[in-house]
């Protein structure tokens, strides 16, 4: 077996807001006013999607080094869709993302074929991406080369 690493986050709720701490780092999570919160921080589902692209970024940096891939920068856009009826109590509707779409724009001198290789490796090794995929949530993940500005 490999090397296990444990993660721990503690949080305290006040209304819809949660203030969490992981080690020396803190994060606040709230809901928009339309959902009963005060919109004082990012919402939980956007936080989850942020975790996905943050994890993909970290894995891209690590794997690019392994591949000797010229990764100059990477930008992400992620969207997730879910039916609110599920989390509001309609048990016939899934209370989680119906689908997630990721688009990454990769700044590199590499070919699209090499970008595809990098993406495949990232998708195989990124814990957050794999958690979604293994849960059966459709994830559309498209990585493209950044256009060079003249």
Image (cartoon, grey):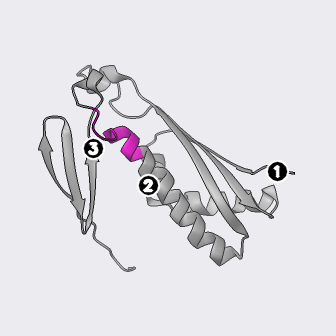
Quadrant of the image occupied by residue 69: bottom right
**The N terminus sits in image quarter:** bottom left
The residue that disc 2 covers is: 128
- The segment highlighted magenta reads 39-48
Of labels 2 and 3, the one closer to you: 3
Q: In this view, does 14 lie above or below 84?
A: below
What residue would you read off at disc 3?
29
Point out residue 32 in the picture as x, y percentages from the top left corner.
30, 29
Q: Nearer the viewer, residue 77 or 141?
A: 77
Q: Which of 19 and 115 is in front in this view?
A: 19
Q: Distance between the residues labelled 3 and 1?
A: 37 Å
Per the image, label 3 sits on a secondary structure element best described as: strand
Mark 2 or 1 closer to N-term? 2
Task: Determine the CA span between mark 2 and mark 1.
Answer: 33 Å
Name the side, left or right, on which 59 lies relative to 8: right
Q: Is residue 98 positioned above or below 22 on the image?
A: above
Identify the residue under disc 1: 149
Quadrant in the picture for residue 87: top left
Q: Write the residue at 22% across / 59% down.
A: 21
Residue 124: % across, % down: 55, 60
| Among the two numbered marks 3 and 1 on one chain, the one whose residue lies closer to the N terminus | 3
Q: Is residue 148 magenta?
A: no
In the image, residue 76 lies at what x, y percent?
Answer: 58, 48
Residue extending farthest right: 150
Q: In which quarter of the image is residue 10?
A: bottom left
**Count of numbered circles on the image:** 3
Contact check, label 2 and label 1, Cβ < 8 Å: no
In percent of the image, x 71 and y 62: which residue is there? 117
């Amino acid at each position: 077996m490999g090397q296990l690493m444990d993660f721990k986050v503690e949080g305290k709720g006040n209304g819809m807001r949660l203030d969490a701490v992981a080690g020396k780092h803190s994060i606040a999570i709230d809901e928009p006013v339309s959902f009963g919160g005060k919109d004082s921080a990012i919402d939980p589902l956007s936080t989850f999607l942020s975790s996905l692209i943050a994890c993909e970024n970290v894995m891209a940096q690590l794997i690019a080094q392994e591949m000797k891939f010229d990764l100059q920068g990477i930008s992400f856009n992620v969207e997730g869709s879910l039916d609110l009826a599920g989390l509001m109590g309609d048990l016939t509707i899934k209370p989680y993302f119906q689908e997630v779409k990721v688009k990454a724009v990769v700044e590199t001198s590499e070919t699209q074929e090499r970008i595809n290789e990098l993406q495949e490796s990232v998708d195989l090794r990124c814990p957050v991406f794999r958690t979604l995929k293994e849960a059966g949530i459709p994830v559309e993940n498209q990585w493209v080369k950044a256009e060079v500005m003249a």
